[in-house]
Image (cartoon, rainbow, N blue to C red):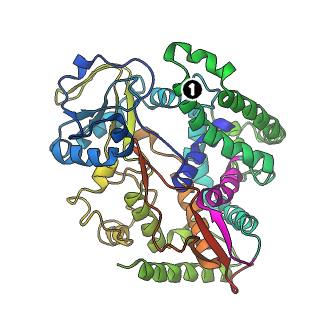
Amino acid sequence: MLNAAIIPFAILAVSCGVFYSLVCLGGSAPRKRALAHIPELRFEKDNTPDRYRNDTRSLLRIGYEKYLQYGVPFQMYNPIGELGNQVILPMKYLDEVKRAPKSLFSFEVFSEKLFLLNYINAPRQTNAATHAIKFHLNRNLNNVMNGLWTEAEASLKKTIPSPGRQSIPGGDLACNILSPVMSYILVGPSLCRDPEWLDIAVETTFSVFDASLDIRKKYTANWRWLARWQNGTAQRLGTIRKKALELIKPLYDERRQAINENDGRSDSGSEMFHDTIYWLLGQKRADTSLEAYHAEITAEINEALAEFKTSGSEWTLQRVARMRKLDSFMKESIRMNPMAFITGQRYAVKSHTFKDGFNLPAGTMFHFAADAVHHDPNKYPDPDKFDAYRFLRLREKVDPNQFHFAFVSDMNLNFGAGQHTCPGRFLAAVVLKFALILLITRYEIKFSDGSTQKPPNVFVDNTIRCKTTYKASYLRSNFCAWTR
């Protein structure tokens, strides 16, 4: 079950700034001469490893302008170094990469080497879990809208219980709200508020990152096989997974009985349970100014809430989808402040020659410069300006069914590309909107230190780390006319 949990909890990382480094890690590097035909990009003057850890975004932008926009790949130093230089491909190769079989370009192998999954007792992403999220969850999302809202509302009240102003670290707020809501869709209402389960869910996510970093630091490649028995974080992952199984077992038995009584299916149209355990068991096995923006978005939210109130306090996907200004605001936010600067990351299991003759050696980790694409002035006018309605205008002028928060294309890459596009992105859109609606309408929020600007981003390798310990204070509004 924790295998399925990894998929939507990856979305939690978008909100709370969990470190997700997309660089070349572990395994056998292609020989340097095998990459000799690919131009190498370096920093001028200060070309130290620390520069690559802290300023990768600027080098990717330079590489985009110098090479990628002209269809030329480039390679750059990998601060970890175990697999040699990382290769950045231009967008013209994206379609071929998306269509390539896993036996050629593998995201799973990339993840194994990124997180050292073979050594840390970590859960794995499985085809069954991906199928459950991609098909069952998205098909049933409208059926769980009100449950998601109830959990978001309850978790916010628990996190900010008193009417007085309170100061809370941003990371704690994100985890406390999103963890129960995501758990509702994973394990259902009977377990989603269980403190022990919630601790396990959050700790698993963070421990995967911590264990891989710790093991890479303390063990050479030849001795990492010892880590699962010697390393404390890796051992802890094994322990909490066993505890998770104990908590899930009663739910598993209950849903298995329901499946057996329904001829082995969970898709009869009148489902007893709307959670990932049920779907996994029953599926066929397949392996301007921000102030102005805020005022208009708040007005849109209030209009939706008024409709929500008059309809008997029932949420639907259609009602949430009508909040297009909020949706555009969210999409512009992740364009400007992405979790990672790259996407479409793969590991070349075999050497491959693309249709234009470019050869990618076996053992190469490669990806696409998503952040540079999102800041290309030919694709996004005035790209360094935050324009909350940028995607709203695109929906109005180009296609109303495109450019929403969960939409992916060659211009919208924050949720990945190809068969590994994040299957839980539609759920993420709903959960984040519910969290924002509750925060915007029920609380007065300001930074605890009196600042009027968000804290600066911290760049680490190919990622942005937000300061999860940076505190904001929350004061509950005196009057909420729509509160149930």
Q: Residue at x 44, y 74 (%)?
A: 325
Residue 201: which quarter of the image? top right
Q: In screen coordinates, is 394 left or right of 358?
A: right
Task: Please say whether residue 165 is one of the residues in the magenta stretch.
Answer: yes
Where in the figure is residue 82, as x and y percent of width and height? 40, 23
Task: Please say whether residue 62 is one of the residues in the magenta stretch.
Answer: no
Where in the figure is residue 323, as x and y percent of width and height? 50, 73
Where in the figure is residue 288, as x and y percent of width and height? 35, 78
Q: Residue at x 70, y 49 (%)?
A: 275
Query: Start and end of the magenta stretch?
Result: 163-186
Can residue 213 be seen at all in this image of the molecule?
A: yes
Residue 445, compared with residue 185, is above or below; it is below
Q: Residue at x 48, y 31 (%)?
A: 114
Q: Which residue is mark 1?
A: 215
* Nearer to the camera, 205 or 181: 205
Q: Residue at x 16, y 30 (%)?
A: 356
Q: In screen coordinates, is 434 left or right of 23?
A: right
